[in-house]
Image (cartoon, rainbow, N blue to C red):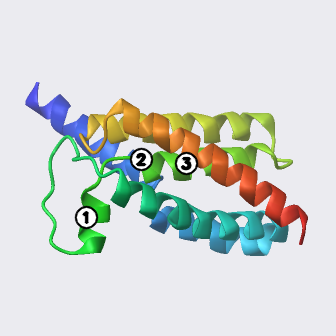
Amino acid sequence: MKAVSYYLNSVMKDVTAMGGITFYAVLLVFSYFLDIRVFYKLLAGAFLMYIINVPLKLVFYKDRPNKMGYKALWEKFEASSFPSVHSARVIFLALVFWTTSMPLLLKAFVVLVAALVMVSRVWLKKHFWSDVAAGIISGLVIFYIAENFVILL
């Protein structure tokens, strides 16, 4: 049973990485060469992700399920559970890619990955479901702003 738990935790860590900033940066670079409008949406989303979520995490600070200590302001941001920036990021990505001309099967895969990332955040005890829900709302707002901003370009 321990082997199964260890394996699931390992898989969930891999899945949660798809909601991280490194994966996002890779998508940003590839989008520059594939579709410049998607690139600009992702770039706008990257900035908005922190403009919106850093103040939220600092003002509405909430300990993670596995509490983290902090001494500096950035550490407080990292230690805060609310909202889930991973969830915001994958919802934003799913919406951006859903609105492209990619095949429906690929769009469904992106949505599935987004759902798995959100589940992984709770599984790994990084967030509560309320944090994930707030991340979803944050991602929706960021998508709306980015979508309307990029249209102006």
Quadrant (top left, top right, bottom left, bottom right) of the N terminus: top left
The image shows residue 51 at horizontal and vertical percentages of: 54, 67
**Label 2 to label 1: alpha-carbon separation:** 13 Å
Residue drawn 76% across the image and 70% down it: 40
Residue that badge 1 annotates: 76
User: Which numbered disc flags the more N-terminal residue, 2 or 3?
Assistant: 2
Mark 2: secondary structure: loop
Q: Quadrant of residue 42?
A: bottom right
The image shows residue 136 at horizontal and vertical percentages of: 54, 40
Mark 3: secondary structure: helix
Q: Residue 90 shows which numbered tag?
A: 3
Q: 48 or 97, which is in the foreground?
A: 48
Residue that badge 2 annotates: 83
Residue drawn 56% across the image and 47% down it: 138
Amino acid on which the number 3 mark rests in the picture: Val
Question: What is the number of callouts on the image?
Answer: 3
Comparing labels 2 and 3, the label whose residue is closer to the camera: 2
